[in-house]
Image (tube, grey):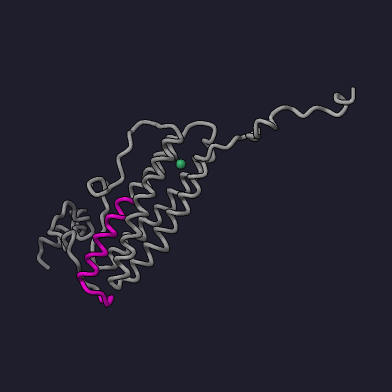
């Protein structure tokens, strides 16, 4: 060992610690550009993987938007049904969040790249942007129902396309996860827009008059 380095390691407390320091501010080329397929051994043609991934990225962007719409309404909810809808909106948010991960990981399994960041989602989604401000419950639910219907419509078309291409995994995900989850959520929130009375039944007009008591009739 050179005389100088032996001297340095003893006198300099920093010496010998370089390898344990984080290497910051690193940059390099992407290893896979967006839209390109890194073919995996899943017995599907690259063209099928590319078509399914493109469709799934559309459903992914729309599912992220729908998920976030639920969280917006969870926070901004107001009125008599606050507690009930606050909880329901968050439950649906969590279920949509699980769908997001399932869809994204299917895209990666096809050798493609899933969308991830908010700006890319905003550029891709077909779900209309809601205002930043608070809205009444019927408007919140109407927005959610319209978004659900957009997702369901595209998911059904894409599921058929995947089945026709032999991509059973994507077809199964779209039918078993996306379509079934969205249909069930539609039912749960739709029932909040049915205008039924809370306390007094909406009886026919002929039954609305109070029945005469027997004692009153006998007099
Ligand atoms: Fe919360």
- The residue at the point 29 percent across, 51 percent down is 61
Number of disc labels: 0
Q: Would you say the magenta stretch is mainly helix, strand or loop?
A: helix
Figure quadrant of residue 30: bottom left
Q: Position of residue 164 (x, y in %)?
A: 30, 70
Is the C terminus in the top left, top right, bottom left or bottom right quadrant? top right
Taking depth in this image into account, of 20 and 187 the one nearest to the observer is 187
For residue 199, side relative to residue 152 (left or right): right
At 19% from the left and 55% from the top, the residue drawn is 23
Q: Please identify the quarter of the rendering in which residue 29 is found.
A: bottom left
Q: Is residue 128 left or right of residue 189?
A: left
- In the foreground, 75 or 127: 127
The residue depicted at 15 percent of the width and 57 percent of the height is 8
Q: Is residue 169 above or below residue 156?
A: below
**141 w.r.t. 80: above or below:** below
Q: Is residue 48 magenta?
A: yes
Q: Residue at x 44, y 51 (%)?
A: 94
Which residue is more in the foreground, 186 or 18? 186
> The N terminus appears in which quarter of the rendering?
bottom left
Whether residue 125 is situated above or below residue 112 in the rendered picture: above
Residue 104 spot, x, y in % from top left: 31, 59
Q: Position of residue 140 (x, y in %)?
A: 42, 38
Is 122 within the magenta?
A: no
Horizontal and vertical percent for residue 3? 10, 63
Q: Residue furthest right?
A: 219
Please state the extent of the stretch shown in magenta in the rendering: 41-63
């Amino acid at each position: 060992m050179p005389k100088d380095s032996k001297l340095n390691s003893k006198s300099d407390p920093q010496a010998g610690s370089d390898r344990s320091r984080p290497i910051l501010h690193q940059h390099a080329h992407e290893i896979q550009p967006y839209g390109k397929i890194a073919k995996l051994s899943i017995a599907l043609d690259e063209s099928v993987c590319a078509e399914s991934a493109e469709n799934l990225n559309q459903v992914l962007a729309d599912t992220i938007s729908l998920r976030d719409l639920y969280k917006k309404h969870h926070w901004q909810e107001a009125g008599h049904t606050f507690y009930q809808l606050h909880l329901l909106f968050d439950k649906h948010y969590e279920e949509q969040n699980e769908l997001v991960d399932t869809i994204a990981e299917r895209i990666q399994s096809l050798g493609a790249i899933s969308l991830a960041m908010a700006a890319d989602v905003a550029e891709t989604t077909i779900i209309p942007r809601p205002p930043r401000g608070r809205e009444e419950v019927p408007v919140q639910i109407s927005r959610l129902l319209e978004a659900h219907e957009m997702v369901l419509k595209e998911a059904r078309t894409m599921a058929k396309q995947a089945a026709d291409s032999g991509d059973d995994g994507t077809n199964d995900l779209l039918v078993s996860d996306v379509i079934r989850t969205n249909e069930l959520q539609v039912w749960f929130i739709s029932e909040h827009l049915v205008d039924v009375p809370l306390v007094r039944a909406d009886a026919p007009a002929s039954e609305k008059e109070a029945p005469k008591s027997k004692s009153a009739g006998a007099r």
